[in-house]
Image (cartoon, helix red, strand yellow):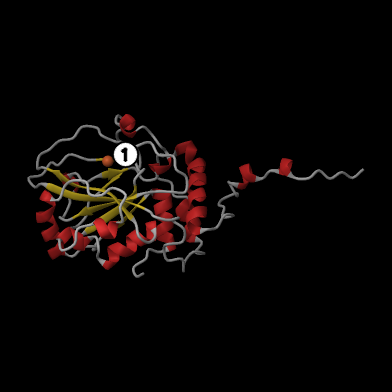
Amino acid sequence: MEHLISSKDMARFVASGYLKYEDMVPEDLCKACREEMVDFGGYLGVGTPFEETWPKNTALGEAFRLPKVKGLIHSLLGPDPLYDHHAAHLVRAHTTRGPDMHQDSVIDFRRNYFDIQLSFFPADTTDEMGGTFLLPGSHFRNVRTGEIRGYQHVAGKIWATCPAGTIYVWNTRVWHGARSNHTDKDRYMFKLRLNPAQPQIRQFDTSDMDDPEIGRILSTNHRWEGNEHRYEIMKRVELWRYVSDQPDFDIGERFLRRREYQPQNQTITTTS
Ligand SMILES: [Fe+2]
């Protein structure tokens, strides 16, 4: 498999819940996708093999089969991912949106598991066009979908501003929402959700696995964590242990050891 993401990028995905890659889809294919996606709505076979289900001989079929896109999907999900759903999001020119921060789908507490969403922007998306916003690092906080609707202006929030051909890939549990389009141009974003078909362990490029930068990446402070930062890091380390297959990995002052050290489970020895 070519175009696998690095271990450092995987650590960024674990810490922040998203990655942004520009130049994923060439301009001519972007244009064809833009024309096609208006009539490309609807659910296909949920839970079926993506490769079998995803239409062939279409621009969008081609875009999500580009070697770079395949490498990205493989890195996060492993081989033979499953199709979940897709949607063509069109925000018309001069559309205003109220507060709509939410977490997608259903309340989901599965450990050592995540689905991905690919957000493909087939046209240049400026700040004023209202690209999707994300709250990096929020994916360890499960909520009841729209109950966070009222949270606005959270420190650390980012939003998609990018040239045509950019793909954001994100853990489906990241808090997110749509923004207002203040321009004269319609805004397009095509979303595709996929599930893994097997354990998401060491599916990325592991050649830089021992880079000390990984510890710093996992400790990223997105600014909203406040006093909870240390507890957020512990959640990230748990997921990093899983995806990197390093069950003893730890960070900082060995944060996880603090609660894993269990002398009360040892055999008692006495000196008398
Ligand atoms: Fe959503």
Q: Residue furthest right?
A: 272
Residue 169 lies, in percent from the top left, at: 31, 53
Task: Say if 144 sits above or below 193 in the image.
Answer: above
Residue type pointed to by label 1: Ser
Residue 175 lies, in percent from the top left, at: 33, 40
Tell me the crowding category of disc 1: few under 14, some 14 to 19, or many 20 or more residues within 10 angstroms, Cα based.
few
Quadrant of the frame with the C terminus: top right
Task: Say if 93 sits above or below 4 in the image.
Answer: above
Image mark count: 1
Residue 211 lies, in percent from the top left, at: 49, 64
User: Which residue is at the front of the view, 52 or 256?
Assistant: 52
* Quarter location, residue 65: bottom left
Residue at figure coordinates x 32%, y 54% from the top left: 82
Ligand 1 placement by image quarter:
top left
The residue tagged with tag 1: helix, strand or loop? loop
Quadrant of the frame with the N terminus: bottom left
Residue at figure coordinates x 48%, y 43% from the top left: 232
* Quarter location, residue 10: bottom left
User: Which residue is at the front of the view, 61 or 167?
Assistant: 61
Q: Which residue carries the number 1 mark?
A: 105
Task: Say if 218 sits above or below 206 in the image.
Answer: above
Residue 181 lies, in percent from the top left, at: 14, 42
